[in-house]
Image: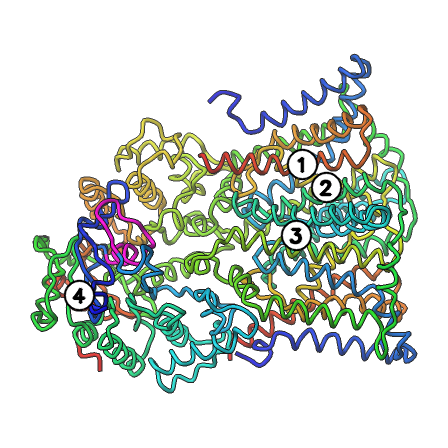
Amino acid sequence: MSFLARHRIILPVVSLAVLLAATFYMQPRAMSYFGLNLLFNLAVPIALATIAQMMIIMVNDIDLSLGAFVSLVACVTATFLHDTPMLGLLILMALILAYAALGALIHTLDLPAIVVTLGMSFVWGGLALFILPSPGGASPDWLRSLMTVKPPFAPMAVVASIIIAVVTHLLIMRSGIGTVLRGVGGNARSVERAGWSVIRLKALAYGLAGLFGVLAGMALVGLTTAADANIALRYTLLSIAGVILGGGEFIGGKVSPTGAVIGALTLTLAASFLSFMRLSPDWQIGAQGAILILVLTARLIFRQKGAEA
Amino acid sequence: MTDHKSAPVVTLLDAAKHFGPVRALDGVSLAVKPGDCIGLVGHNGAGKSTLVNLINGGLSPSSGEIRFSDGTAALEAGVRSVFQELSLCPNLTVAENLRISHKALKGPGWRRPARVEILQSLDRIFPAHGIDPNAEVDTLSIAERQMVEIAIGFAPRGTAARLVILDEPTSSLDAGIADQLLAHIKRFCADGGAVVFISHMMGEVFEVANRIIVLKDGRIVAERATADFTRQGLVDAMGHVTAETADAEGIRQDLGPEIVRTDQGLSARKGEIVGLSGLAGHGQAAALARLYLSRSSSWRYGRTPDVAFVAGDRPRDGVLPLWSILRNISISALRQGARRGLVDRHAEADVAAQWKDRIGIRTDDVRNQILSLSGGNQQKVLFARALASPASVVIMDDPMRGVDVGTKQDVYAMIRAEAARGRTFLWYSTETEEVCQCDRVFVFRNHEISAELTGADITEENILAASFELQEAS
Amino acid sequence: MTVLTKPWIWSCVAAAVAYALILGLTSGRGAGELAYAALSFGAFAAIVGLGQMLVITLGPGNVDLSVPATMTLAATLALKAMGTDPGTAMLGLVIALFVGFGVGIANYALIYFLRLPPIIATLAASLVYQSLAIWSNRGLRIKPPSGLADFATGRFLGLPNVAWVGLFLAIVVWVVLERSVWGRWLLATGQNMRAARLAGVPVELVRALTYISVAVFSALTGYLLASFSGGAALNMGAEYLLMSIAVVVVGGSSIAGGNSNVPGVWGAALFMFLVVSMLNSYGAGAGVRNVLTGTIIIGIVIAASTRRVRA
């Protein structure tokens, strides 16, 4: 086993550092409180969505409805949570429970998660349109001020990302239940044999995904102050890419919350970097796809090296 | 208190387990007391793993009774099992894997006690093991994983282990580490623990067990103190008494040139029936799969395939479950008679009908679903598939599972007839009497060929002797 | 075996019910126009659905998420090459099919060489295709040559030409799956890849050709759709991602692979269009429409899974 294979976190950290250095080199003025704030402005909701996706990938499934779900949460936040906070809160909690139920359903009936979540993306998207047929709504004031608070030393986006990374690291990597959840991804049979209910564990993983999806939608509204039904559709893709960039694997429960947050930051920065590069906006989406393929290729090479050693 | 200490950890009263018509375990009575170290031996299909699964609560008996001393469940009674197949979570660290089966570890700071507990257990069993409890399991070698699994089996985990079942625990350990394990088992039993020890290494069984139980055909055929057994006596007890397969055909001399040879030393000549034997899981199936894959391609195809495969693990390797019998038979022979890429459906139906009669598939219509057939008849379909293809080498991976005796005789005859016409058969079987039908036999042990037998040397006795390691486990 | 036990019958019955419900509302007015529209729009969903069905037949985890990007890229490049010049329709078709072929090879190369799960490979690759389409399009809206546009919107024997194309392809796919050696290999691979390999099926060749087929089908749909709607738009393929998977599932093909269902795809394509028309004519908004579509898909997946458990 090579050093790199043993420490999966190194590749994401190096990617982020290289990208950050390149950005500073291209645009030295970015190296400031204000500049960093600008660069990582939208990182918080993406990081939260990436964590949500990570919870699903952790138990060997994949969620193709996350973008639609975050959009729906944004719409609920900008309408119900703003106008009638209690009702809004209830709706958001019901959404989290719906996610948990979905996890239990997928496991019990052995359904293909791709198709179910694809179908759910219609449902979430439809509900979002129903709530907010045209862009609008408003962010609750407390949320707005929370997202735009200016902490000393480092901008909000950076501080929040660190907090998210620490909290989810404690939850998934350090706590006992997080360990068992990762065990479900690694070898569900042996977890079941040790006396755990895998259905409940899967429901928990999906429920956590729902929770972080809700947080992502709220954070997004706090930043944009308004919502629309398509506001976060690209998060499905970004979140999967973030998990993978952060060193996570699609199967086997090998995930890293810190890596996922770093992956989300890398993706956010990549967008800013590509615009600094004066790369035509035509190519920005493609460049993200290419980066994803490159990282996966790099990882394959490292893994093969590790297997040879 | 003294009563509790000497009461059996687990008692089986006439316990039986049936899978459909198959009697995997046919009335076994057994008591495991503290301090017992029971060596459990038996040939393939004798019922060892069924017995283990009854004791550890993985299966419940079809009839009879299983009683645990503490509580009703195996886990509560402190019964642990260490399986031959690896059952750790590869993405977790060593200490985290302990957490999976140790629910009492809770609250913040559970990692430190988990590390301490697994490290203590490892230190106790394998001094100087050098395993870091913070290492992820998939960075460990196979031997280290096996050591971790054993250590988790013996770790207290809140309740203290009272009976540990070890299924081939030394299969991937080197001799020095295996000795450490044997020493630990002795200490553990001396301190009032109980162990059920399954191994193909006779030396180990004799060294560690104070009682040996021989299983055959789902029954206990011998249960005595270790001192009352000799090694040869033990092998004889495992064997079939009626092993009189004096196949008076003699050695066939009319074999063609050698057409199969692998790096492992497996070889076969044209028209030869080559048997592979040894205990299940010692690399026979893997050797055959490798041979098949190396002689066929996932990309190219020709009109005549070089090799054909008869699967024994039907759901995994053989049956195409959504299809009819007809399509299952014809899949390997489609390229013959196909015109412009289209299947010749008349020829296909003829071939299927012909094989239905020749091999006696019990169905009124070959267009019925394959899953409507019994296991034995499904197996006949897989035979028909391989024999209907023009391949010159037929590889058979334990193909007689669930096949009744009459059919077996038919298939043997068919295999001999096909061999006489120049086809080569490589035949892995878990049943020794089948292997005794072959022209030449390779016996596997620990993924290597341990013996090559020909002609009159092909006897059940010789095969058993080569399957088990009779030497001292030094 | 009665006709009722065929899994494709249900999507056709559902389409007929939706059709009847709409006509009930309009008391029979516009029956012909509705059927014509359903056949026109259904044809596009049916063609991409046929391609997606082949991939899904390969078994769990196999799906092509680059369908929309492939459609857009093929349509954009074809229209650009034709440049509204008359007589270039064949050139455009060849370019579209060539794009599909290249995309299919690229997708499969990612799956095979990088050992990526097909979902991720096609997703990542689709971003690149999308960029290529954006770059080559540059916001221009090039009209298709008038002859081609007339063909795409025209009719023959009372049926839309695109529906004829869709029917023809459905028959081709059906013959390939039911009668050809390659179809048998595909179905065997989807049921159990290991067993198929051990039965002598060249499984990797089968998978490669399948991924190429789906991309070619998507490219053809993109070409036809752009000709039909008067030009390529960057979001023209967007709804066909979910649509292509939905028609396969609703059409009665098994998501677990190895079992495909050509007539069901057509039935489901008509059904999906008619459901939307029905909800529209009952005055439902886009939100309700989407929720119901999603619910129908999930409901059918659940129904299929319980049927599997009982069988």
**Vertical comparison of C143 with A157: above or below:** above
Direction from residue C235 to residue B322 in the image, left or right = left
Q: Is the same chain shared between marks 4 and 3?
A: no
Q: How would you rate the neighbour count of disc 1 (Cα within 10 Å): few for under 14, some for 14-19, many for 20 or more?
A: some
Find the distance from the CA under tag 1 to the CA under tag 2: 8 Å
Q: Secondary structure at mark 4?
A: strand
Count of labels in the image: 4
Badge 2 vs badge 4, beta-carbon distance below 8 Å: no
Tell me where residue C24 appears, x and y as whole percent.
Answer: 75, 15
Q: How would you rate the neighbour count of disc 3 (Cα within 10 Å): few for under 14, some for 14-19, many for 20 or more?
A: many
Three-letter code, disc 4: Leu
Q: Which residue is mark 2?
A: A122
- The chain letter for the residue carrying disc 3 is A
**Vertical comparison of B218 with C304: above or below:** below
Mark closer to the observer (2, 4)? 2
Q: Which residue is mark 3?
A: A63
Q: Quadrant of residue A302?
A: bottom right
Find the distance from the CA under tag 2 to the CA under tag 4: 66 Å
Q: Secondary structure at mark 1?
A: helix
Find the distance from the CA under tag 1 to the CA under tag 4: 65 Å
Q: Residue at x 81, y 27 (%)?
A: C280
Q: Is the same chain shared between marks 1 and 2?
A: no
Q: Which residue is mark 4?
A: B453
Q: Which residues are magenta?
A: B48-67
Q: Residue at x 68, y 50 (%)?
A: A96
Specify the label residue C295 is tagged with.
1
